[in-house]
Image: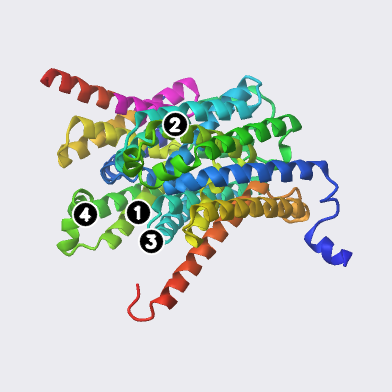
Amino acid sequence: MFAGYMLNTWAAATMVAVVAGVVGFFIVLRGSAFVAHAVPHGAFGGAAGASLLGVSTLYGLGLFAVGGAVAIGWLGRRGRHDVATALSLVLMLALGALFLSMSSEYSAEVFSLLFGEVLGVARSQLLPIAGLGVAALGVMAVVYRPLLMLSVMPETSEARGLRPRQLETIFMLVVAVATAMTVPVVGAFLMFSLTLGPAAAARSFTSSPGPALSLSVAIALATVWAAVALAYVTNWPVGFYVGTTGLAAYGAGRAWVAWRRRAAA
Amino acid sequence: MSDAVHVLFEPGFFSSATVHSALLVGAVVAVVTAVVGTFTVLRSQAFAGHSLGELGTTGGSAAYLGGINPLWGFVVIAVVSGGIIESLGVRRPRLRDLTTGLVLGGGLGLAALLLYLDTTTSTTTGASVTILFGSLFTVSSNSAAVIVGLSAAALGLVVACYRMLLLASLDTDLAAARGVPVRVVGFAYALSLALAVSLAAATIGAVLSTALLVGPPAAALRVTKRPSTALAVSAGVGVAATWAGILLAYDSYYWPPAHRGWPVSFFIVALVFLLYVVVDVGGSVRRRRRLPVGGH
């Protein structure tokens, strides 16, 4: 499990979990679950296109994730945000279906893009993943306070001269970057589980932002490490473990809340 | 004259039984999803609709593994999870989306495992692709009969409680004050949504079903505010996009690069998307004309 060829995966999984934990914290805070689902899911189309052209899937993922985020923002500029998200998502997925139908090599590679693969990370991908991760965390560090303000109190922050549209766009781009680096490990279908589950669980344990953020990262790390280890042992897709562990973490959080309420009463 | 026809319609389009069945099934499903979807858009529940379709992947792959028609897997899982989401009854949108997302994540995790088992146990490689992205041309005549029957049921349900459903979708509190049984209507709607989505999943694919559910109604509601007109327009748009998609897919058989046809679901989704963008841009141009000074 810790052989040389697995070290890439462990390293990538760790970076992915840290970024997903941080980004997920804001996604849960802002309640933008649908967008968090749509961007990585739709980015699968880009990965399929990249593999058809024979270039690194990172490019395809990045292009589609950024394109999707921009399209959702533009189409949803006058309300009906959920409709804009849904339509952008299905268009990207339909393009993915088209690329798949054109390519001759199906199955294994496609499947690992959809649902994650333990050996899905090549050594050459490690550096780009690290770069994207550092960039995402750097941007989050810069916009942390204003974004927190905007997410918790949208009205007052506008009065304080923050620019909601710009902040929103920056955050969407961070989600896109996180997508490009996460999908090769966890798969396009389940990346949003990794952002939602740990962060939602963390929020049920504590409501103050700092500890919730750290806890979200910690749970994400535990989730990803457990998922990679289990996937290695059983040979089942990583996505299965990420999805179910994410839900279980949230269930544990809810149970904790219920228990606390009982104890208090 | 016949040359001109052949540019549009590849020879054999009108005589092929596969095409006939695709046109029929496509039209029926498009009408039902467009009608149900109008309420989905009015209730801002695109994410719930999308989730039900995608959760269908879990049912579809389980049915495939058990050698049953995936359609039944779609229907059962959608009805069950629709019931769960509705009975949780979370009203605050942020929390509702979060709960939906978490349930969807767990379901998709399971789907990943089932599809993995599908691909390892069966010799055909296309199981995941068919379940996820569908194909109108491979709908069997058995399924076609079931699809038409279930469509009638879903449509009947919506028609039966049309006025109450409309009121409850536009203003829940007002509806409740007027004595509309909001919870019952909510469950009736959830059931028809689950049926419509699973029918769309069986025809254009689990992950693409949302296109027919949300696209035509959203475009129609941009054009008109009258509910009955919106229903008619969205049904018409849905059928038109589906038929045009079938035609293009049939014609694409000789297109590069693979010469085995482009997927029909791709054409349908792309047409729906294009149409929504046109209506959206057209709407903002008209609005700008109406507000010549300082409009925004």
Q: Residue at x 44, y 58 (%)?
A: A71
Q: Quadrant of residue B173?
A: top left
Helix or strand or loop: what does disc 1 sit on?
A: helix
Left or right of B139 on screen, residue B151 = left
Specify start and end residues of the magenta stretch as a single range. A224-251
Q: Quadrant of residue B99?
A: top left
Q: Which mark is residue A154?
A: 4
What residue lies at 60% left-to-right and 32% top-to-bottom? Answer: B153
Camera-side mark, 2 or 1 = 2
Camera sees residue A40:
no
Q: Decide: marks 2, 3 in contact (CB < 8 A)?
A: no
Q: Amino acid at mark 3?
A: Arg
Amino acid at circle 4: Pro
Q: In the rendered structure, the residue with mark 2 lies on which chain?
A: B
If you read the primary sequence from the N terminus, does the residue marked by circle 4 or circle 1 appear first?
Answer: 4
Residue for badge 2: B187
Report the residue marked by disc 3.
Answer: A78
The image position of residue A226, as x and y in percent, is 36, 25
* Residue at the outermost right position: B2
Q: Secondary structure at mark 2?
A: helix
| Point 41% across, 59% down: residue | A70
A115 on left or right of A156: right
The residue beneath circle 1 is: A172
Viewer can see residue A219: yes
Closer to us: mark 3 or mark 1? Answer: 3
